[in-house]
Image (spheres, rainbow, N blue to C red):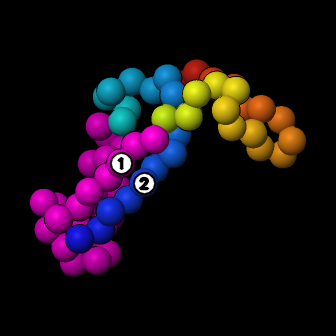
Amino acid sequence: MPYVKIKIMEGRSIEKKQKMVEQVTNALVNSLDVKPDDVRIEILELREGTFAHAGKLASKKTE
């Protein structure tokens, strides 16, 4: 059973997150030959000011 953790910056709509988990599920089903019911995905949303890249705090990006 694949268990995937995905970290993204907070602020994305439910619709965008739904599209993402559908596509990730499909990728795992096709590449690992598993059933969709076997796929687990955990979305971890990072708050603004709690993540940095290249020495700078990441900020929210618009959709």
| Direction right: furthest residue | 55
| Three-letter code for the amino acid on which mark 2 is drawn | Lys
- The quarter of the rendered structure image containing the N terminus is bottom left
Mark 1 or mark 2, earlier in chain: 2
Taking the image as drawn, is residue 41 in sight?
yes
**In which quadrant of the rendered view does residue 14 lie?**
top left
Taking the image as drawn, is residue 23 in sight?
no
| Contact flag, marks 1 and 2 (Cβ < 8 Å) | yes
| Three-letter code for the amino acid on which mark 1 is drawn | Glu
Task: Tell me: residue 32, above or below residue 45.
Answer: below
What residue is at 32 percent from the left and 40 percent from the top?
A: 19
Instruction: For label 1, count other residues whose C-alpha is less than 10 Å away and answer few (under 14), some (14-19) or many (20+).
Output: few
Q: Which residue is label 2 attached to?
A: 5
**What x and y, as percent, mark residue 2?**
29, 68
**In which quadrant of the rendered view does residue 20 lie?**
top left
Q: Which residue is label 1 attached to?
A: 42
The secondary structure making up most of the magenta span is helix
